Amino acid sequence: MDEALLNFLVHAVNNVGFPIVVIGYLFFRFEKKLSALDHSIQELDADFHKRKKAKE
């Protein structure tokens, strides 16, 4: 692990506490997955409306 990152993590834990740092880490880790899920939902919605109009 990079020394600068380790120093940042130690400083963050000292300032805001371990649970807050863990929540921040998890948020940034899952952000990509949430964006992909949002994109998939939007595609499904568009496809649903497209098929609904085609049936009419």
Image (cartoon, rainbow, N blue to C red):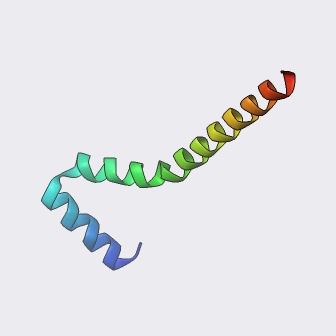
Residue 10: image location, x then y, percent: 23, 65
Residue at (52, 45) in percent of width and height: 34
Residue 9: image location, x then y, percent: 27, 65
As drawn, the residue found furthest toward the front would be: 56
For the N terminus, give its image quadrant: bottom left
As drawn, the residue found furthest toward the right would be: 55
The residue closer to the viewer here, 50 or 28, is 50
Residue at (32, 50) in percent of width and height: 22
Number of marks: 0
In the image, residue 44 above or below residue 5: above
Q: Quadrant of residue 7?
A: bottom left
Residue at (21, 62) in percent of width and height: 12
For the C terminus, give its image quadrant: top right
As drawn, the residue found furthest toward the left would be: 15
In the image, residue 31 above or below residue 3: above
The residue closer to the viewer here, 13 or 26, is 26
Residue 36: image location, x then y, percent: 61, 48
Query: In this image, 52 relative to 12: left or right?
Result: right
Query: In this image, 54 relative to 30: left or right?
Result: right
Residue 14: image location, x then y, percent: 14, 60
Query: In this image, 52 relative to 27: left or right?
Result: right
In the image, residue 12 above or below residue 2: above
In the image, residue 40 above or below residue 5: above
The residue closer to the viewer here, 3 or 24, is 24
